[in-house]
Every structure is written in structure tokens, then in C-alpha cells.
Image: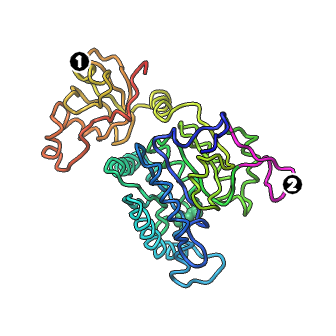
């Protein structure tokens, strides 16, 4: 393998990778680009060992136009929703089949804006995707375009992919499209534009290089990619923009193909803990016993059994303070139950949750990943 420049990261060093694929790579006038998709699946299979892989695939609308023999040109909202409905079936089928040829199992996940932006739904989406990963599947994610209307949709999969990456604590997000990275100015308009191999911080100057907001070229173009970089790197996820033109685009990045890396100066875990401990207002508190304090300090989740008292009015997904037996705040976390349910299961064994509440909830009151202890 060709050596890469010492300043840019290497794909192999990452453990949880989200790969976003633009429509034009996966679909053309004839339908699915099967040879390309097959080569990408081979790359994914090559990276599989010891890594979690997730795909965010566009292409439902582009594919659906063909499936439904729709005319060329701009579509009305309901037409693109219908196109997505027909196209998503075919798209997911192509992914499932292609990944299976390379020994990988696909799990389709369709998200709307609320699934990543509302805390309650966020916990659900994250836990489903986390379970798919634990079971060894490759989540194949797209926006749920058939129900998402303009006010409640991302509209572009660059930012959706960035939200997914931060939601699952991915350490790398790869944006594959028809551009090979960020230039100092839009390269088609400015012959003096220089390619940037590495961006260490998404500054206003970097954002300006992506082109003006609102232009036709910026939608799903460089502007949303730089915005994705801002979201990803702030949450500790490194991002790379690379061209998917050639076959085996992931292998090509590893071999040093031209691309732009956006590095994060923190890890996903650290960024999340900083966010939980510093930037959220708490809605209530859980007082835990001494045994639970010890378990939390050893890196365990907070189970209902260790909770002595519940106070405040909070919903599932809200931030609450974790208080030790003497009332001192020992940390904060996002709670998996609302105040009423938390009160009912406090002090109980997790196995009793279903009997007490009448539904099978999470075994943890606050999952380890959703917690930041003082001094951590
Ligand atoms: N979700 C859209 C689709 O699958 C694509 C959005 C995008 O290209 O960024 O057709």
C-alpha cells in the first residue's frame, strides 16, 4: 500500500465508520450501478474485521424516477415522495443483495429529522442502530423521504450522515460523491483554486470556500459537506470528503487518493461527556446508593436497582443529576425512563421492569454512554 502523508489519518485506524454515498454514484439512467456497488461492498468487507460499518445511501428518489417512468426535471414534493417510495425498495434490495455477496448483512433504517434531533426519539434510533451493529449487521440508512416534508426534513444526506455519525459515536465519516474534496474556491469557476488535503478546524474562512448559501450548486454540494464537517468534528468524528468516481473508493482513500480530511481534536466519547456535563440543564435527579457509586466509578451503567430516590419532572431522554447517598452531585446523564416510570422501578432488579411497567424497557436507568461523572 502506498504511504499516505504523515499529516492525514489512515482509514484503518478507525473503528466505527459511516460511509455516505451520493445518488449519482449508486444510480444512473439505467438504474443501480451494480459493478460500482459491488466494488464498494468488497471495500466494506475488507474493512470489516474489528470495525463497525454503517452506510448512508442516497439514491431512492433518483432510482424511483426510473422505476415509475417519471418525466425528467424538477419534481413536486408528492412526486419525489412517491419516487422515494418506489426507489427505496429497490435501493435497499440492491444493498442487501450486494452486501450479502460479500458476507455482510444489511439492515435498513429510515430516519426523519426528529429521530436525530429529539432526545426521546434519538435514544430509540441510536439503540436500534447500536443493536444492529452488535448483531454484526451493516445498517443501511436513508432519510424517510416518503413521509418527510420540507419543514421536517434534512433534504440532503450529508448532514443526515453527520448526525448519524455523531449519534452512534462513529470515529470516521466518509462522504463519497462526485467531488474529491474542498478547494480554496469552487474549482469550476476559479482556475486558481487549490485543493486542501487537510482541514484542522472548520472556520468561517473554510465555510466561505464552500460557496455561497442558497445557490443551486450548494444544495447537497460543498456547503452541506462543510456543514457536515462542522457537525462531525465538533462531536469528535473525523470526516473525509472523497470522490467515488472510480471503483473501490474506500481502498483508494487508504492508498492515498486525493481527498480532504477534516480532523477532530477530541474523541466522540470525550465530546459527548463534555456536552452532557457542561451544556445540558438537568430536569431532575436520581439519588443512588453507595454500591451504585462504586459501580459507576468502575465504568458501569446505572441500573434501577441502585437508585434510592427520584426527584423532579423529567421525560425519557432528559438530562438528570446523579446524586450520591449524601446528596452530592457525582455526575449527570440522559435518563432512559420518565420520572413516573423511574420512580416505579427504582430499587428493583432490571428483570422486573417488564412486570412493573407492562413493557420491556431498557435494562439501564442511565446507560454508560449517556453519562458523565464529575472529574471524568
Ligand atoms: N434521501 C434522498 C434519496 O435517497 C437523497 C438526499 C441526498 O442526495 O442528499 O434520494
Task: Using residue 250 as the reference point, say whether residue 16 is left or right of it.
Answer: left
Q: Main secondary structure of the magenta part?
A: loop
Can you tell which quarter of the image residue 265 is in?
top right
Q: Nearer the viewer, residue 59 or 327?
A: 59
What residue occupies the far top of the structure in this picture?
A: 326
Between disc 2 and disc 1, the foreground one is 2
* Magenta-tinted stretch: 182-199
Q: Identify the residue at image location x=66%, y=78%.
A: 73
Q: Is residue 196 magenta?
A: yes
Q: Nearer the viewer, residue 11 or 150?
A: 11
Q: Identify the residue at image location x=49%, y=27%.
A: 278
Q: Nearer the viewer, residue 252 or 126?
A: 252
Above or below residue 245? Residue 239 is above
Report the quarter where the N terminus lies.
Answer: top right
Can you tell which quarter of the image residue 335 is in?
top left
Image mark for residue 191: 2
Q: Which residue is mark 1?
A: 290
Q: Nearer the viewer, residue 182 or 48?
A: 48
- Label 2 sits on a secondary structure element that is loop
Q: Which x, y percent locates residue 209?
A: 76, 47
Q: Which x, y percent locates residue 166?
A: 49, 43
Amino acid at each position: 500500500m502506498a504511504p499516505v502523508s504523515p499529516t492525514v489519518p489512515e482509514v484503518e485506524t478507525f473503528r466505527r465508520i459511516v460511509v455516505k454515498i451520493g445518488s449519482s454514484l449508486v444510480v444512473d439512467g439505467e438504474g443501480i450501478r451494480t459493478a460500482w456497488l459491488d466494488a464498494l461492498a468488497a471495500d466494506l468487507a475488507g474493512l470489516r474485521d474489528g470495525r463497525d460499518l454503517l452506510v448512508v445511501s442516497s439514491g431512492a428518489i433518483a432510482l424511483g424516477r426510473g422505476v415509475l417512468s417519471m418525466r425528467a426535471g424538477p419534481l413536486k414534493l408528492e412526486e419525489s415522495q412517491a419516487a422515494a417510495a418506489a426507489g427505496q425498495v429497490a435501493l435497499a434490495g440492491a444493498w442487501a443483495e450486494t452486501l450479502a455477496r460479500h458476507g455482510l448483512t444489511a439492515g435498513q433504517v429510515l430516519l426523519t429529522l426528529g429521530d436525530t434531533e429529539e432526545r426521546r426519539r434519538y435514544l430509540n434510533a441510536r439503540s436500534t442502530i447500536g443493536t444492529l451493529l452488535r448483531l454484526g449487521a451493516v445498517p443501511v440508512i436513508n432519510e424517510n423521504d416518503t413521509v418527510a416534508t420540507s419543514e421536517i426534513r434534512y433534504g440532503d444526506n450529508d448532514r443526515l450522515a453527520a448526525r448519524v455519525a455523531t449519534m452512534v459515536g462513529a470515529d470516521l465519516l466518509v462522504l463519497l460523491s462526485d467531488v474529491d474534496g474542498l478547494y480554496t474556491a469552487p474549482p469550476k469557476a476559479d482556475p486558481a483554486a487549490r485543493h486542501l488535503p487537510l482541514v484542522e478546524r472548520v472556520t468561517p474562512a473554510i465555510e466561505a470556500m464552500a460557496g455561497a448559501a442558497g445557490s443551486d450548486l450548494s444544495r447537497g454540494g460543498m456547503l452541506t459537506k462543510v456543514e457536515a464537517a462542522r457537525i462531525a468534528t465538533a462531536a469528535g468524528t473525523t470526516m473525509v470528503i472523497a470522490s467515488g468516481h472510480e471503483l473501490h473508493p474506500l481502498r483508494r482513500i487508504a492508498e492515498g487518493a486525493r481527498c480532504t480530511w477534516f480532523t477532530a481534536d477530541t474523541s466522540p466519547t470525550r465530546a459527548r461527556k463534555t456536552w452532557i456535563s457542561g451544556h445540558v440543564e438537568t430536569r431532575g435527579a436520581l439519588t443512588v446508593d453507595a454500591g451504585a457509586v462504586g459501580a459507576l466509578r468502575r465504568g458501569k451503567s446505572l441500573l434501577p436497582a441502585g437508585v434510592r430516590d427520584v426527584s423532579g419532572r423529567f421525560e425519557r431522554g432528559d438530562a438528570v443529576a446523579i446524586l450520591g447517598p449524601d446528596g452530592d452531585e457525582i455526575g449527570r446523564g440522559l435518563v432512559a425512563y420518565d420520572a413516573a416510570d423511574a420512580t416505579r422501578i427504582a430499587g428493583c432488579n432490571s428483570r422486573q421492569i417488564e412486570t412493573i411497567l407492562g413493557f420491556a424497557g431498557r435494562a439501564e436507568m442511565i446507560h454508560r454512554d449517556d453519562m458523565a461523572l464529575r472529574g471524568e
